[in-house]
Image (cartoon, grey):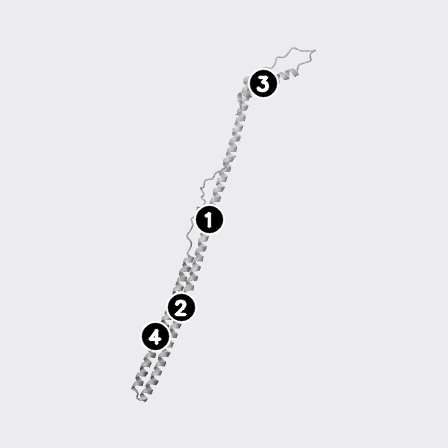
Amino acid sequence: MINKEKLAVSLASGVMLFSATFAFAQAPSVGNVPPPKPLPTVRPVKAISEARKEAVEVRKEAVSNSKEQIKEIKNKAKEQIKDTREQLRETKEQSRMQVKETVKATQEARKEAMEAARKTRITALETARTAMKAALDSATATRDTALKSAKDVMNTAMTAAKTNNSVEAEKAARDANKAAVQVARDAYKTAAQAARDAYNVSVKAANDAFKQAEIAAKPAPAVKTAAPSATSTITTTTQ
């Protein structure tokens, strides 16, 4: 702060000193000395008033400059806050779009993986069904061939037995045919059961593979992350 009283006194003293110095410089030589002129009267009240006015003006100017600086700092801070909030909004929007695109890509990949798994399962089931049918057809053909062969053998033996009028030979031919038929039927049952077991194993393997693919295609649990807020507290430092 400016000391108004000291400033006024200093100005008054300066005016008096200047007046005395000026009067001394204007004095004539010693040989021709006119009567001394009266010194100008210094009015300290006026000087103090002027000093006060000047001090007030200085203070007003300083206050005005301070207000302008404060206003400029506030405006800069407002602009900085506005820009920062805009950046936060843009970042949040970009993050939202990235999450949306990631979810969409994940869903598409899961859809494709599940479709591929379904096709693989269908192909495996069809292959297993075809293999079982082929095995059953082969077992049926083997059984039918064995039965026909046993019947032919029995017919030949029966013809020979009747020709020889041998009851024992006829009975032996029937027993042999019965045994051959039982062997053929047992062989068919064994082959058919083996074909069905192989089919069931293939079906289970296909279903298990499909379930594993389904589990692998499921999205991982989402991890929640704190998104930047557009109303976050912003601190500015002014100098």
Q: Nearer the viewer, mark 4 or mark 2?
A: 4
Q: Nearer the viewer, mark 2 or mark 3?
A: 2
Furthest-bottom residue in this view: 164
Q: CA distance from mark 2 to mark 1?
A: 49 Å
Residue that carries the numbered disc 2 in the rendered image? 128
Residue 231 tag number: none
Q: CA distance from mark 2 to mark 3?
A: 122 Å
Which amino acid, by three-letter code, is at mark 3?
A: Ser
Residue 227 versus residue 151 in the image, above or below: above
Say whether marks 4 and 2 touch (CB < 8 Å): no
Residue 222 versus residue 155 in the image, above or below: above
The percent coordinates of residue 206 (x first, y second) are 40, 64
Residue that carries the numbered disc 1 in the rendered image? 95
Q: Nearer the viewer, residue 159 or 21?
A: 159
Q: Secondary structure under badge 1? A: helix
Q: Viewed as shown, does residue 43 lie left or right of 25?
A: left
Which amino acid, by three-letter code, is at mark 1?
A: Ser
Furthest-right residue in this view: 31
Residue that carries the numbered disc 4 in the rendered image? 186
Say whether marks 1 and 4 touch (CB < 8 Å): no
Residue that carries the numbered disc 3 in the rendered image? 13
